[in-house]
């Protein structure tokens, strides 16, 4: 059985694609055969974040419409052997994603022995976003410590609870996880930013992890290498911990407490 | 004293305001999306059931949704006709 994980948020620019790339890579690094699908038809970006943009020949919509087969469209990741990317179409309109088409491709991936299928949702609550969550077994809701992001996350949770197949068919509900991204322990400590516990209290779903705000994310996207590969950075370690928790391991939260810089550090700077 | 706070870098703690605002709006939107849709039907059914036993005016049953702390409470108010 393949497990379908949808990475969603409602709001744009909070880190869905960054998270999709890192979660998919993290699962593949643990030995699971993993596919990551870009559902953002018309505005594809997962290919850039994964660094495979120059190898895109066929896309998700080509496969749905039968212009190419899945094998031709899947791009093997350059960092992980058992990770494959299915890019979104840059040219078609979003209605090209039909429910039957999406279901057929997910079934075929399962048939090919994939353990995890990660669906990178577009922003918003319209067709593309609904298609990305329709078949979800688990959902990772990416939220920034900021009012509009928290509100939109709550909206998207409502949609998961009403429009997913699991909800419609009355099966066990989609398992929801909260991932707080772009977190600044210092600003949260000083009362300038919602804390991760505030957000969890508001959204009332289990916390999968807290990813700190970091320059490493921009370095990663500049190079087309998922942030989880930026060795020994807090961002990569936080994603690795989140993967562990997703797989049922216990890891204490890191990078969430603010340490006051010592006198020397304050005088001489440094990172 | 603004120059003092400037030197010492006093910052505004606005996160608590954000949290309060979110608590209110999220609660309201959750109700708006999943709640009151069924209230008119509930009211009709209650009128039908109670009318079996007591003669009442449909307007004398009021159904409302309220929030008390973390709980949502359905409040039903039934005014029985005066006994003579």
Image (spheres, coloured by chain):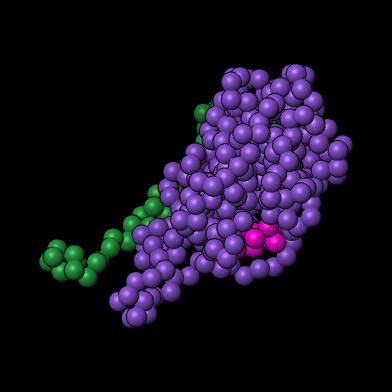
Q: Which residue ends up furthest to the bottom in the rendered image?
A: A263
Most foreground residue, B68 or A148:
A148
Report if residue A245 lies within the magenta region: yes
According to the rendering, which colour does chain A have? purple
Most foreground residue, A166 or A54:
A54
Quarter assignment of residue A249: bottom right
Q: Residue at x 36, y 55 (%)?
A: B17
Report if residue A139 lies within the magenta region: no
Q: Is residue A245 left or right of residue A179?
A: right
Question: In the image, is residue A131 above or below residue A10?
Answer: above
Give, as a single range, the part of the protein colored magenta.
A237-246
Number of marks in picture: 0
Instruction: Residue B52: give x, y in percent of width and height.
Output: 69, 30
Q: Residue at x 58, y 32 (%)?
A: A44
Most foreground residue, A240 or A72:
A72
Q: Is residue A29 left or right of residue B70?
A: right
């Amino acid at each position: 059985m393949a497990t379908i994980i949808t990475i969603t948020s409602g709001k744009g620019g909070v880190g869905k694609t960054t998270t999709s790339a890192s979660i998919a890579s993290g699962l593949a690094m643990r030995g699971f055969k993993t596919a990551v699908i870009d559902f953002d038809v018309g505005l594809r970006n997962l290919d850039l974040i994964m660094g495979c943009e120059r190898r895109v020949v066929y896309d998700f919509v080509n496969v749905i419409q039968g212009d190419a087969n899945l094998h031709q469209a899947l791009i093997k990741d350059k960092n992980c052997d058992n990770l494959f990317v299915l890019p979104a179409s840059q040219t078609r309109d979003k209605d090209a994603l039909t429910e039957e088409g999406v279901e057929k491709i997910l079934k075929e991936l399962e048939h090919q022995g994939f353990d995890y299928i990660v669906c990178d949702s577009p922003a918003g609550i319209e067709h593309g976003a609904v298609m990305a969550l329709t078949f979800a077994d688990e959902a990772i809701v990416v939220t920034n410590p900021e009012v509009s992001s928290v509100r939109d996350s709550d909206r998207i949770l409502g949609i998961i609870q009403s429009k997913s197949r699991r909800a419609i068919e009355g099966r066990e509900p989609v398992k929801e996880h909260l991932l707080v991204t772009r977190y600044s322990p210092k600003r949260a400590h000083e009362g300038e930013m919602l804390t991760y516990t505030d957000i969890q209290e508001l959204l009332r779903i289990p916390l999968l992890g807290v990813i700190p705000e970091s320059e490493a994310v921009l370095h990663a996207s500049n190079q087309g290498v998922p942030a989880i590969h930026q060795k020994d950075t807090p961002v990569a370690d936080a994603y690795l911990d989140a993967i562990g928790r997703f797989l049922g391991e216990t890891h204490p939260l890191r990078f969430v407490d603010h340490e006051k810089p010592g006198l020397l550090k304050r005088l001489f700077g440094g990172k | 004293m603004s120059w003092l706070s400037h030197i010492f870098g006093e910052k505004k703690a606005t996160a608590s305001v954000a949290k309060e605002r979110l608590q209110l709006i999220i609660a309201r939107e959750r109700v708006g999306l999943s709640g009151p849709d069924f209230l008119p039907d509930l009211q009709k059914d209650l009128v039908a059931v109670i009318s079996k036993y007591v003669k009442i005016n449909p307007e004398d049953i009021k159904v409302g949704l309220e929030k008390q702390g973390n709980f949502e409470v359905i409040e039903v108010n039934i005014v029985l006709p005066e006994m003579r």
